[in-house]
Image (cartoon, rainbow, N blue to C red):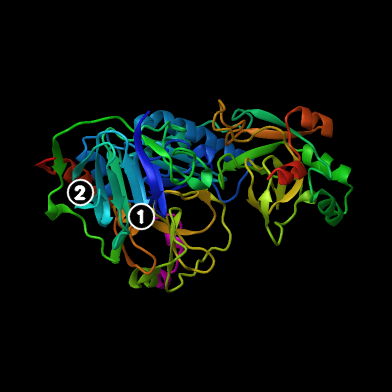
Amino acid sequence: MSGLRVINPGLLSLLQDGGRIGHHALGLTTGGPIDRYAFDWANRLLGNKPGSTALEVSFGGLELEAELATCVAITGANNVVTVNGETRKLWQGLVLQPGDRLRLDFCDAGCRNYVAVAQGFDIDPVFGSSATVMRENLGGLDGGKLRSGQLLPCGETTWNQMLRLPESLHPEYPDHLVARVVPGYQYEHFSTVKKRLFFGSEYVVSEASDRMGYRLDGPAVASPIQAMLSEGICLGAIQIPADGQPIVLLQDRQTIGGYPKLGAVLSLDCYRLGQLRPGGRVEFTPISMDEAHNQLHLAAVHFNQVELERVLA
Amino acid sequence: MTATFSIDRAGESAVIAYFGTSSSPEVSAAIHAVAQQVRRELGGELVDLIPSYASLLVVYDPLQTDHHRVGDVLRTAANNSVTSSSTAGKLVTLPAYYGEDSGPDLGSLAATAGLSVEEVIRLHTGMEYRVYAIGFAPGFAYLGEVDERIAAPRLATPRLKVPRGAIAIADRQTAVYPATSPGGWNLIGMCPVAMFDPDGNPPMPVNVGDSVRFEAIDRGTFLELGGELITDAVAGS
């Protein structure tokens, strides 16, 4: 088996696919890419099946050496990508020849890049998925983050035409965002004053944020509920612990928990939230379930209708 | 169905059904029955289900269905479900080695409770527990409820390392640690049966809604069944 050799794993690089679905009853979380939008583009630029295994590179610093001819596509945070020291573009397919060195610098806006390879990395699934969840020691090559010297297996590909996402459609990665929230769970139990405070305040992303959840610092939203039975947690759930500082639960969240919740951040905005670094700012705005539903359908239609540009390799 | 059944939104593609405000074998059986029916009815529209103490989270594919339909399916299932606590789930017997070398908190728990160690073991093995929820870590099954005489609060300072297989009590819940992890529960014994094995079929001996009974075994039997003692685990780490 051949593939891409890890020369430098960077700070936190993880193999991810579309996520581990259908095993919540065993206590398994989904994992999967924090920024599903950028991840989906990386795969689509190479004509891969949606959810093919790719790399999520948090903060950067990754260096790989190709041991075969293949193509990669890098999307996500603003970063400098080089092949053998020459700068290459994000958001388009890139050809790699055996011996080529692909390097990602440290990103300067946003914090996660996605590196997809033609046909996806060839990783044995665990519970139906290759998604790496370090807390569960499952997925990827060995349940952990990439290490120097590892081989990321993939197939050989030779193409001479590449696809590119038009520049006008590249997302921006500002350090401030307004996240849409579907009110739910214990929302009705919170006082009107506390709900106004939550939706009227700016929160700062804490250093303690990770793939499990984004911890926010700001005006405390005191919970009216002292003790409640643990219950299932969905993506984006906004948990309010005893100190009143909200936590938005992301891909590596625990499956059940006993803190009151205000509802959940729209998935499309979870993807953007997860690109914020510590110190980034977020505000919240409520939307109705119907509006959320429409936004999801529109996003799916938009993704499928984009016409990609062709470039010679 | 109980009068306290209600459905709330959770997020853009999840709704949560509440079956009451407290857990009980009856509530657990109702959740189990409704979960099965929802799974059948939604088929490919369903993404995942999370049953817990008194609730069921239903995660669906918003591109294929919506919360109106999922709510209807839940309400219909709740109205139609036969909720006899005897029909749902299987009974699983887990061997348990209770001893000073397997349960470092067994002696102090007995002393605090004013019971002998033998009485604590008799009370812990004397009850049929229900699997109310699975979470915290893969394969961590919350079992309830222990006899109130052996209920014990979590340790003030959690241990950094609780070994895989440790049988523990926190308040009126009991559990077997599926993997070595930090933990604040009181350790009273060790179970040689793996609670989570990614390569196993099934990967867990229990599901939510099943019943569990502990059966006391001696040290020799524990080791014969492949059990490892805490001291071994610590020494080998």
Pick the residue in front: B224 or B9: B224
Q: Give the residue type at disc 1.
A: Gly
Look at the image and tell me whether residue A250 can be seen.
Answer: no
**Circle 2 is placed at which residue position?**
A91
Determine the secondary structure under disc 2.
loop
Does A42 lie within the magenta span?
A: no
Name the chain letter of the residue that bears numbered label 1. Answer: A
| Horizontal arrangement in the rendering, residue B186 relative to residue B177 (left or right) | right
Residue occupying the point 46% across, 33% down: A126
Determine the secondary structure under disc 1.
loop
**Circle 1 is placed at which residue position?**
A61
Q: Give residue B14's position: percent from left, percent from top.
A: 39, 46
Name the chain letter of the residue that bears numbered label 2. Answer: A
Pick the residue in front: B137 or A111: A111
| Horizontal arrangement in the rendering, residue B32 relative to residue B233 (left or right) | left
Quadrant of residue B154 within the rendered picture: bottom right
Pick the residue in front: B37 or A267: A267
Q: Give residue B53's position: percent from left, percent from top.
A: 57, 45
Q: Earlier in the sequence, mark 2 or mark 1?
A: 1
Question: Dot 1: few (<14), some (14–19), or many (≥20) neighbours within 10 Å?
Answer: some
Q: Which residues are magenta?
A: A184-195
Q: Give residue A267's position: percent from left, percent from top.
A: 32, 51
Look at the image and tell me whether residue A259 can be seen.
Answer: yes
